[in-house]
Amino acid sequence: MRWADHHCHLSPDTADEQVAEAREAGVEVLIDVGTDVASSLVAIDMARRFDGVWATAGVHPHDADGGLDGLEDLLGLPEVVAVGECGFDFHYDHSERGAQREVFAAQIAMAHRHDLALVIHTREAWAETFDILRAEGVPERTVMHCFTGGPDEARSCLDLGAHLSFSGIVSFPSAPELREAAALCPSDRYLVETDSPYLAPVPHRGRKNRPALLPAVGAAVADARGVSVDVVAAESWDTTERLYRLAPTS
């Protein structure tokens, strides 16, 4: 089985170890995600260092107050396959909500302008997320990273044309509605991720997450969907290649 971790945050200090361990676990594609201009530059460096690693460039809602200076200059680089992660986070509200909206809208426009995928972070802001996507237009290749909604939110995302990405949360006993969402998602509209170093899946909760644990996320998705793990590996691999327009590795 080959796996694609479409959303992780590599640390330069441990990247060699993490990438090697991921390869041993069958995780052959990693997308290192930027959350501001500085971390996007680090992700681009990771993509240049390792085969099978790509980068995104974006400003997370936590950092929206800092603006977007320098971000668009990164979007034409060959290592960059998406804009984001960007969106709303009303749980922490580290940035003013007006700034979150302005910065999110600008990044949606960048995804349209550069014909790039869009990686969305949304927390406690479903109505606002749907409103801005309807207003700005949903980029053709959009993914709801670390999807945490239930069946209703899943259907709304799918109706807008977005993809759903499932993290280790899908394995948590407290997430039955998330497993319902995973079950109803079309086979060509879901991805899997670790969001490492966060959200380690069962049975690794309480430890630092890493891309090598992606197969455990895939196993939880397979259980929710009532299919074999190799089906989830193949379907999520194909969707990741298509969504990010990655050069085929086979």
Image (cartoon, helix red, strand yellow):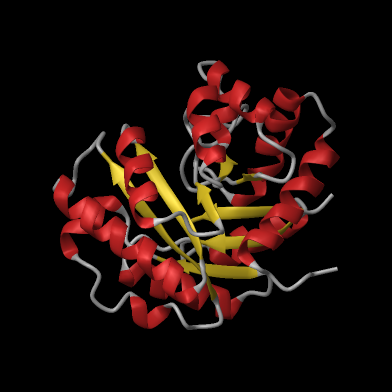
Q: Nearer the viewer, residue 162 or 206?
A: 162
- Residue 172 sits above or below residue 160 on the image: above
User: What residue is shown at x 30% (from left), y 39% (from top)?
Assistant: 128
Which residue occupies 23% across, 75% down? 69
User: Quick check: can you spot residue 66?
Assistant: yes
Q: Nearer the viewer, residue 157 or 240?
A: 157
Seen in the picture, residue 40 relative to 197 is either above or below; the reply is below
Displayed quadrant of residue 122: top left
Residue 146 located left or right of residue 250: left
Q: Where does the image place residue 121, in percent across and percent down from the top left?
A: 40, 46
Q: Position of residue 161 (x, y in %)?
A: 56, 47
Q: Position of residue 102 (x, y in %)?
A: 22, 57
- Is residue 150 at all visible to an observer of this figure? no
Q: Residue at x 51, y 43 (%)?
A: 160
Question: Is residue 181 placed above or below 121 in the rendered structure?
Answer: above
Q: Relative to 188, is 28 above or below?
A: below
Image quadrant assignment for residue 159: top right
Q: Total number of numbered labels?
A: 0
- Is residue 152 found left or right of 65 in the rendered image? right
Q: Looking at the rendering, in which quadrant would you find the C terminus?
A: bottom right
The answer to whether residue 171 is left or right of residue 57 is right
The residue positioned 38% from the left and 40% from the top of the image is 130
Q: Position of residue 173 (x, y in %)?
A: 56, 16
